[in-house]
Image (cartoon, rainbow, N blue to C red):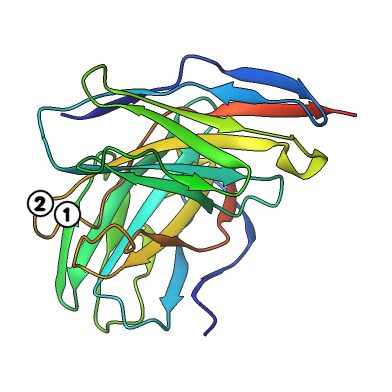
């Protein structure tokens, strides 16, 4: 069974600084996707960024980027120029890419990010 | 499109009561899922459906029933609520193709408290 581990229950960062959230996963699959979701106090689950395991290039979305190390099974999220609105719970998630697997994401336990002004 | 909608947003039940959490999507997605979120646990899959008339169990199915009579709707039923079912419940939908862009779309969640 696949597992996703987020080893940092809480992190804090100063506004305008950079922070990195860690995620490791365990799988025997070679074809899969990894995601970072943001959950603000509103509870809404918001997709931040996604990475396909077959792509060597790390995904980037504006101030958000990932460091995907497939051999190490590591998938960290870097937030640059942190803003107060980035304060939220962040979840790392995994989904395998075999046919018909798009009904299930496996989530880590989350990292609560605080942004200090 | 409204996306994925859930009702109610909040609910308080007494132990032993029954209720149905509603979920609907207007994106014509074949796949729908129910997750529960508990503090320190992330989201865990309760039940899922790969199409109308087809449902199956996820990681934590005990105490919950589902049915899928239409593509749009996927209600979650608690037959006899227990305090251990106090949680935030999320419904999600997705197309079946599994392409990178086809991730799950989440509803706003229902916070359920069982006294």
SS for dot 1: loop
Residue A101's tag is 1
Q: Which mark is residue A78?
A: none
Q: Callout 2: few (<14), some (14-19), or many (20+) C-alpha neighbours within 10 Å?
A: few
> Which of the 4 image quarters holds residue B110?
bottom right
Residue at figure coordinates x 76%, y 26% from the top left: A17
Question: Which residue is more in the foreground, B78 or A98?
Answer: A98
Q: Chain of mark 1?
A: A
Chain under numbered label 2: A
Horizontally, residue A101 falls left or right of residue A7, namely left
Pointer 2 and pointer 1: residues touching (CB < 8 Å)?
Answer: yes
At label 1, counting other C-alpha atoms closer than 10 Å, the crowd grade (few under 14, some 14-19, many 20 or more) is: some
A21 versus B24 height, above or below: above
* Residue under the image location 30 percent in, 76 percent down: B29
Measured from the top left, where is residue B19 in percent x and y? Answer: 47, 63
Residue A6: x, y in percent? 45, 21
Residue situated in front as seen by the camera: B16 or A113 = A113
Q: Name the quadrant of the C terminus of chain B.
A: top right
What residue is drawn where x is 57% and y is 23%?
A20
- B36 w.r.t. B4: above or below: above
Residue A49 in picture, x, y percent from top left: 47, 47
Which residue corresponds to mark 2?
A98
Q: At numbered mark 2, what does the secondary structure look like: helix, strand or loop?
A: loop
Q: Is residue B35 left or right of residue A110?
A: left
B2 up-or-down from A103: above or below:
below
Residue A40 image offset from top left, x and y in percent = 68, 45
């Amino acid at each position: 069974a696949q597992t996703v581990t987020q080893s940092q229950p809480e992190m804090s960062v100063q506004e305008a600084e950079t922070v990195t959230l860690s995620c490791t996963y365990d799988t025997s699959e070679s074809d899969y996707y990894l995601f970072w979701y943001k959950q603000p106090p509103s509870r809404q689950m918001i997709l931040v960024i996604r990475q396909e395991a077959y792509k060597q290039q790390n995904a980037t979305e504006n101030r958000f980027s990932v460091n995907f190390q497939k051999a190490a099974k590591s998938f960290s999220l870097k937030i640059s120029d942190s803003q107060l609105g980035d304060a939220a719970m962040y979840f790392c998630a995994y989904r395998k890419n075999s046919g018909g697997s798009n009904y299930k994401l496996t989530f880590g336990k989350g990292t609560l990010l605080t942004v200090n002004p | 499109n409204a996306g994925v909608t859930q009702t109610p947003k909040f609910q308080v039940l007494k132990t032993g009561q029954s209720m149905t959490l509603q979920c609907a999507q207007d994106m014509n997605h074949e796949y729908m899922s129910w997750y529960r979120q508990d503090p320190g646990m992330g989201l865990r899959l309760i039940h899922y459906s790969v199409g109308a008339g087809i449902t199956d169990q996820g990681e934590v199915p005990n105490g919950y029933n589902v049915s899928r009579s239409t593509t749009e709707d996927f209600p979650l039923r608690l037959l006899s609520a227990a305090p251990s079912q106090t949680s935030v419940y999320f419904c999600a939908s997705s197309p079946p193709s599994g392409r990178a862009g086809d991730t799950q779309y989440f509803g706003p969640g229902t916070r359920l408290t069982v006294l």
